[in-house]
Each structure stands twice: as structure tokens, then as C-alpha cells.
Image (cartoon, helix red, strand yellow):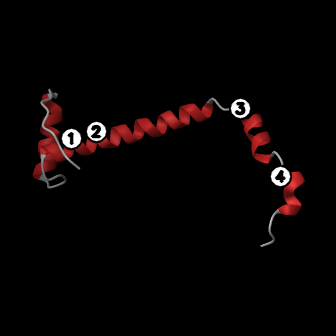
Amino acid sequence: MSTVKVAISIDRSLLVQIDQMVKEKTFPSRSKAIQHAIHEKINRMNRSRLAHECSKLDIKLEQALAEEGVSTELHEWPEY
């Protein structure tokens, strides 16, 4: 993964907490700590976006689509 330098402004109390984690060797550097936090936040947002989109689905319609043709084609399925 290639990285680029960026300048950010951060609340002093957050920086103190990050520095403490670096001191305790939770993270090797401030940069890695911030990268990890951003990565986790983006992943969380992506999961919640999927949940939000799924909540828009019509459950009965989705069930009907999933079962469409199953009963008529059941005899064509291989035996296990």
C-alpha cells in the first residue's frame, strides 16, 4: 500500500491519548494509530450503510423472489 503525507488538525486531548498509546506500544507511531482509526471508522460506516440499504428491502418480495421457481424445479435438483 502506498502512503502519502497529509497535514491534519486534531484536538490536543486526542493527540495526548494517541501519544499515550504509542508510548505503551499499542501502535508504533502516531501515523499508524490515526491510519488504524480511520480504517476502522470507514469499515464501520460501510457496514452501517449496508444495513441501512437492507432495511429498505421488502421482506415479503425478497422471500418470494428467493423461492420463485423452487417448488416447480425441485425435482430437477440433484440428490445429496
Q: Quadrant of residue 10?
A: top left
**Label 1: few (<14), some or many (≥20) within 10 Å?**
some
Looking at the image, tell me whether mark 3 or mark 1 is earlier in sequence order. 1
Looking at the image, tell me whether mark 2 or mark 3 is earlier in sequence order. 2
Labels 4, 3: front one: 4
Residue, disc 3: 58
Labels 3, 1: front one: 3
Secondary element type, mark 4 = helix
Horizontally, residue 26 falls left or right of residue 79, namely left
Q: Quadrant of residue 53?
A: top right
- For the residues labelled 1 and 4, the Cα–Cα distance comes to 50 Å
Secondary element type, mark 1 = helix
Secondary element type, mark 2 = helix
Number of callouts: 4
Nearer to me, 53 or 9: 53
Contact (Cβ within 8 Å) of mark 2 with mark 1:
yes
Residue, disc 1: 34
Residue, disc 4: 70
Nearer to me, 71 or 21: 71
Secondary element type, mark 3 = loop
Residue type, numbered disc 4: Val
